[in-house]
Image: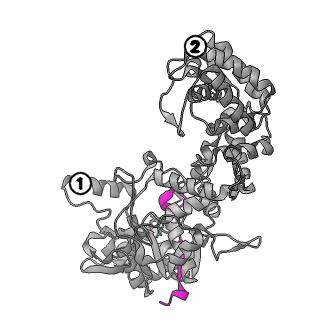
């Protein structure tokens, strides 16, 4: 098959919201199509009516659109392509089932579900290896069939799997794979409701859509011999197969919710960037070499190949995702390198409007409702350069920036359940919408209550008339520390807690300049008031 004729598909079943594994499959197919100049198709495999989940199709398509995984064909709707949907193509599968029946490759099975359960129970009792069906209807005489038909008993159509021999295929990742036919059942092709099973609909569509390569999750490997047998029975040429490596959690267990394998949409809502997600997903089972971690989408398209897909399972590493996301956030954030002449404290890089836009959106979404809306873009623009370096995902922006919007509240008596863990790289002092902090934090490691109070009182006076830009604040407050006989580290730590309610925050003077005189004075005053009670 020449590469130009590549036709691949992503064929999700809408039985749930798409997770990392599903979308990794979509991405690999898309990359392969784009790399080879082939076509990428989306096909919704919704023939299992009982397992359909409401909203799943939308979630699948939203995820693809968010990541820029576009498809090239499908029924046209409003100048756009809709995905193919199997439930709308039922007659095609029924025709095919009929063809298989007529060719002697399939048969009607009239067994009731009660009979099947009983059969399975008996097999279990006899400790026979579990089969889903004992083939009772496989060899019915025409007379017996006619009788059953006359009784109007509902039936399913089953495939007449060869009883002996083997079925082999070459998997582009795993190599030669062989299954003994005796391990395969007479699986159902058409259900009693007239819907096809996955096996039938999947191969009919792969054939009709001229799919050249099937890249799909490892879990489908055991279905492939059934598909090959179907292709043979119908005299269709099978596509090439490539079963993608499993994705495991860091504990090497199958990836699950527990590992943070939530739906892709949730990652979007938590503030991950699509370019980071694409980069991360591409590395789940594919690598160019043993060192390159950052790939733009264009580079992935350029380099992607099935040969470089790994045989061994991929490990889902959330820290890596965060690291990649942080990389893209920073890459996008700054548009102008700070000039060398600018003084160290005035060194504020200019933020891209894209970054400011995304930051504003996330703050609007995540800041507590008490913060007035709309959130001022101008204010966000000033905050952005102070936090962008620490930001690993937009979902944590509100937590990082909270003190710019909410008054910190010093407390002397605190609830006992204060979590001590570090959250988002900053000690969480008290969770929730209020920015409550322990007034004792004002003392830092070295200050006495008296020294801290004297420090805050002096700061209060000095902050009334000092020019409120970062370099003036730096100069004046450094000076003041000297006058008070305090170490700058202790004094600045005191001020940091007073104005931000945190022990770790962005650069103090720039932060104060952005907060502005009025807010800073109010906060220092509040801190001083509580310090008296410590
Ligand atoms: N509908 C199957 C799924 O949900 C498709 C498997 C395949 O690609 O053949 O993953």
Question: Relative to residue 260, is residue 217 depicted above or below?
Answer: below
Segment tinted magenta in the rendering: 1-23
Q: Regarding mark 1 in the picture, which secondary structure is present there?
A: helix
Where residue 113 sits in the image (x, y, percent)?
39, 57
Q: Are marks 1 and 2 in contact (CB under 8 Å)?
A: no
Q: Residue 324 or 506: which is nearer the viewer?
A: 506
Give the mark, 1 or 2, whose residue is nearer the N terminus.
1
Residue at which label 1 appears: 124
Q: Residue furthest top?
A: 533
Q: Which mark is residue 336?
A: none
Residue 367 in which image quadrant: top right
Q: Residue at x 18, y 55 (%)?
A: 126
Q: Residue at x 44, y 65 (%)?
A: 151
Q: Crowdedness of circle 1 by 10 Å Cα count: few (<14), some, many (20+)?
A: few
- Could you give the CA–CA distance between mark 1 and mark 2, rounded to whole angstroms? 77 Å
Q: Residue 234 or 371: which is nearer the viewer?
A: 371
Residue at which label 2 appears: 449
Label 2, ligand 1: CB separation under 8 Å = no
Judged by depth in the image, the label closer to the viewer, 1 or 2, is 2
Where residue 170 sits in the image (x, y, percent)?
34, 81
Q: Regarding mark 2 in the picture, which secondary structure is present there?
A: helix
């Amino acid at each position: 098959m020449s590469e130009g004729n590549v036709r691949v598909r992503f064929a999700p079943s809408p039985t749930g919201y798409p997770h990392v594994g599903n979308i990794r499959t979509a991405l690999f197919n898309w990359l392969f199509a784009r790399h080879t100049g082939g076509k990428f198709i989306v096909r919704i495999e919704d023939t299992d009516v009982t397992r359909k989940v409401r909203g799943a199709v939308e979630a699948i398509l939203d995820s693809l659109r968010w990541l820029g995984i576009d498809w090239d064909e499908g029924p046209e709707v409003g100048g756009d392509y809709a995905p193919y949907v199997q439930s709308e193509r039922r007659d095609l599968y029924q025709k095919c089932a009929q063809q298989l029946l007529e060719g002697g490759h399939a048969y009607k099975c009239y067994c009731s579900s009660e009979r099947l359960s009983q059969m399975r129970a008996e097999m279990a009792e006899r400790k026979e290896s579990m089969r889903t069906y004992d083939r009772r209807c496989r060899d019915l005489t025409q007379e017996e069939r006619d009788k059953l038909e006359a009784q109007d008993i509902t039936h399913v159509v089953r495939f007449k799997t060869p009883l002996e021999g083997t079925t082999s295929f070459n998997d582009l990742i795993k190599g030669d794979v062989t299954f003994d036919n005796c391990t395969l059942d007479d699986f159902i092709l058409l259900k009693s409701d007239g819907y096809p099973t996955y096996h039938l609909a999947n191969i009919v569509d792969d054939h009709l859509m001229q799919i050249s390569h099937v890249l799909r999750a490892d879990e489908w490997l055991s279905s492939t011999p059934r598909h090959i047998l179907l292709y043979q029975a119908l005299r269709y040429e099978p596509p090439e197969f490539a079963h993608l490596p499993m994705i495991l959690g860091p504990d090497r267990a199958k990836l699950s919710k527990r590992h943070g394998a939530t739906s892709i949409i949730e990652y979007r809502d938590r503030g991950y960037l699509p370019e980071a997600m694409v980069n991360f997903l591409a590395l789940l089972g594919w690598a160019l070499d043993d060192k390159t971690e950052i790939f733009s989408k264009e580079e992935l398209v350029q380099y992607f190949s099935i040969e470089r897909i790994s045989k061994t399972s991929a490990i889902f590493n959330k820290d890596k995702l965060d690291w990649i996301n942080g990389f893209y956030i920073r890459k996008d954030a700054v548009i102008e390198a700070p000039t060398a002449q600018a003084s160290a404290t005035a060194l504020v890089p200019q933020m891209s409007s894209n970054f400011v836009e995304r930051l504003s959106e996330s703050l609007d979404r995540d800041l507590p409702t008490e913060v007035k809306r709309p959130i001022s873009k101008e204010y966000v623009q000033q905050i952005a350069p102070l936090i962008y370096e620490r930001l690993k995902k937009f979902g944590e922006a509100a937590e990082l920036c909270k003190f710019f919007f909410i008054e910190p509240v010093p407390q002397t008596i605190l609830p006992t359940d204060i979590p001590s863990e570090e959250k988002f790289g900053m000690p969480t002092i008290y969770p929730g919408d209020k920015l409550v902090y322990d007034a004792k934090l004002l003392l830092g490691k070295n200050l006495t209550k008296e020294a801290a109070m004297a420090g805050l009182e002096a700061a209060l006076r000095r902050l009334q008339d000092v020019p409120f830009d970062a370099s003036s604040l730096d100069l004046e407050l450094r000076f003041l520390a000297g006058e008070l006989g305090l170490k700058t580290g202790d004094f600045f730590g005191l001020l940091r807690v007073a104005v931000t309610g945190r022990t770790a925050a962005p650069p103090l003077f720039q932060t104060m300049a952005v907060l502005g005189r009025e807010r800073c004075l109010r906060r220092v005053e509040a801190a001083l008031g509580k310090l008296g009670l410590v």
